[in-house]
Amino acid sequence: MSSETPAIDFYFDFSSPYGYLAATRIEAIAAKHRRQVNWRPILLGPMFKAAGTAPLIAVPLKGPYSARDLLRTARFLKVPYVQPEAFPIGTQNAARAFYWLADRDQTKAQKFAMTCYTTYFGHGIDISSAEKIANIAAQMGEDRAAVLAAMADPIVKERLKGEVDAALAKGVFGSPFIIIDGEPFWGNDRLDQVDAWLATGGF
């Protein structure tokens, strides 16, 4: 990647089903346009507070619709999807582990992110606990004890808080949220626009 083609910022919460659907496509879209992707997990709680909103599932009328839309969209994209029994969940452990891994190996961190997503939304398995996250990382060859320690490390906790604050400062308020050269796109249903924007240089 040259300095003339900065990376795409991909913001997501591990508890976001639309974030999961976007995560299955973002790398292929970026690669088509010779871009890299900065995966940036966030926490939607502070976003909802700042925007004065609530989780979609808790919104009257929209909640039942979204449940149907998610299943339909997953079928349309041919992406495995199971609505988890535990939903939504806290995702701070997954996000902390991600940033700890990313500081060591970006590629492995992205693989970890997709494994977390497919575990949760592809198989319906709760990934909120530190133990579950450590197990996922261990299956990728990481030291389980080191991952557990990292998630409890005040420095790693502060790192995640800083990432969330920085995202808010850039106007991020949902998941998925994609920023290309300063242009923001919110939602899985904006990926076709993302593709066209990258192809044309903007419109």
Image (cartoon, rainbow, N blue to C red):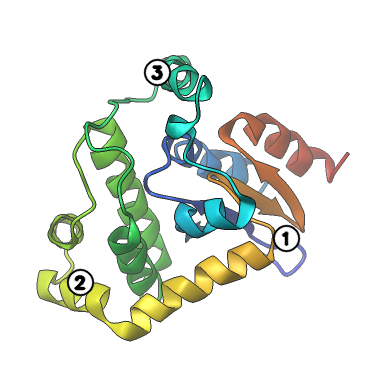
Seen in the image, is 23 located left or right of residue 169?
A: left
Real-space Cα separation, disc 3 to disc 1, in angstroms: 35 Å
SS class, disc 1: loop
Near mark 2 (Cα within 10 A), the count class, few <14, some 14-19 or many ≥20, is many
Which is in the foreground here, disc 3 or disc 2? 3
CA gap, disc 1 and disc 2: 33 Å
Q: x and y percent of residue 138 in the render? A: 14, 62
Q: Secondary structure at mark 2?
A: helix
Dot in front, 1 or 2: 2
Q: CA distance from mark 3 to mark 2?
A: 33 Å
> Nearer the N terminus, badge 3 or badge 1?
1
Q: Is residue 38 visible?
A: no
Placement of the N terminus among the 4 image quadrants: bottom right
Quickly name the residue at label 1.
Answer: 5
Residue 194 visible at all: yes
Q: Residue furthest right?
A: 203
Q: Tag on residue 71?
A: 3
Is the Cβ of the residue at disc 3 closer than 8 Å to that at disc 2?
Answer: no
| Front position in the image: 200 or 21 | 21
In the picture of the structure, the residue carrying the numbered disc 2 is: 147
Identify the residue at horizontal 30%, vertical 59% (top origin). 94
Residue 91 image point, x, y percent? 33, 55
Q: Disc 1 residue type?
A: Thr
- Of the residues under marks 3 and 2, which one precedes in the sequence? 3
At label 2, the amino acid type is: Val
Q: Residue at x 32, y 25 (%)?
A: 80
Mark nearer the viewer, 3 or 1: 3
| Vertical relation: 47 (above or below) 21 | below
Q: In this rendered view, identify the residue nearer to me: 134 or 63.
A: 63
Which mark, by number, is residue 101? none
